[in-house]
Structures are given as C-alpha cells and as structure tokens.
Amino acid sequence: MIEDSSKATNHLANERTFLAWLRTSVAIVVFGFAIGRFAIALRQLSAFQGHVTKTTGLSVWMGVASIVAGAVLAVAGLLRYRRTRMLLEEGKFEPAGFMVDVVTIITVIFGLALAGYLIFVEKNLS
C-alpha cells in the first residue's frame, strides 16, 4: 500500500510540474502578444498624431519570437511530462538537467536581447 501511495504522489508531482511548464508557456505567449500589440498600437498612435511611421522596429518580431518560444516551451513541457511518466512507471527516474539548462539559457538570451533593444531604442530617440 505504501508503494502505491508513493507512486501516486510521484505522478501527481509530475502533473503539477507539467502544469507549471504550461503556465509559464502561456505567460510567455501572452507577454509576446503584448510586446507585438504594443508596438502596433504605438505606430497607430503616431499615425493618428500625423507622424507616419512605416515600421514598428524589432518589437513585433520580438513579440513573435516570444510567442513561438512559449509554444515550444509548452511542447517541451509535454514531452518532459510524458517521459517522466514513462520512467516513473518503469521504476526509474532521471532529473531534467539538460532541459532546465536549455530553457534557462534561452530565457537569459531573450531577456538580454530585449534589454539591449530597449537601450538601443532609448539612445536613438534621445
């Protein structure tokens, strides 16, 4: 009975971890949409004020990249969930070392790119 309880606990923890991946991916998708939509809104506001702007800069593309990254993260979370479920059923388990490293590195690179872009835009507007 203890073994079954432990197995259920492990599977429930795996599901909670998957849901955390899913919540994170949804947040990244929404963030990307907000970035892209904000750039478009600024262009429309500029046009309304009589300033013709032909481009939104990199903001829309950064928003698109964020949306794609969120979708990829959701798929990665699902693959991790299924793999962990299979390993738990077999009585084996391996921590997610490589996947955690990849997600962290991509997040840091994207964050630095956004920060660099904001600095670039600020210097060009000044």
Image (cartoon, helix red, strand yellow):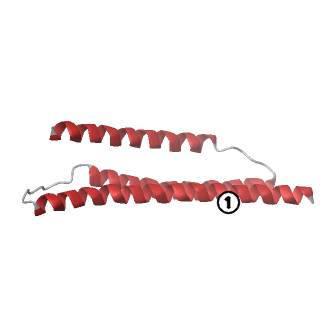
Tell which residue pokes out farthest to the left in this image.
Answer: 50
| Residue occupying image coordinates x 50% and y 56% | 25
Q: Amino acid at mark 1?
A: Glu
Residue 38 location (% of width, % of height): 28, 57
Residue 42 location (% of width, % of height): 21, 57
Residue 31 location (% of width, % of height): 40, 55
72 up-or-down from 108: above or below: below
Report the front residue among 58 and 123.
Answer: 123
User: Which quarter shows the C terminus?
Assistant: top left
23 up-or-down from 98: above or below: below
44 with respect to 87 (left or right): left
| Residue occupying image coordinates x 40% and y 42% | 111
Residue 125 location (% of width, % of height): 16, 41
Q: Quadrant of residue 101?
A: top right
116 with respect to 27 (left or right): left
Q: Quadrant of residue 68?
A: bottom left
User: Which quarter shows the N terminus?
Assistant: bottom right
Report the front residue among 29 and 51.
Answer: 51
Q: Which residue is mark 1?
A: 15
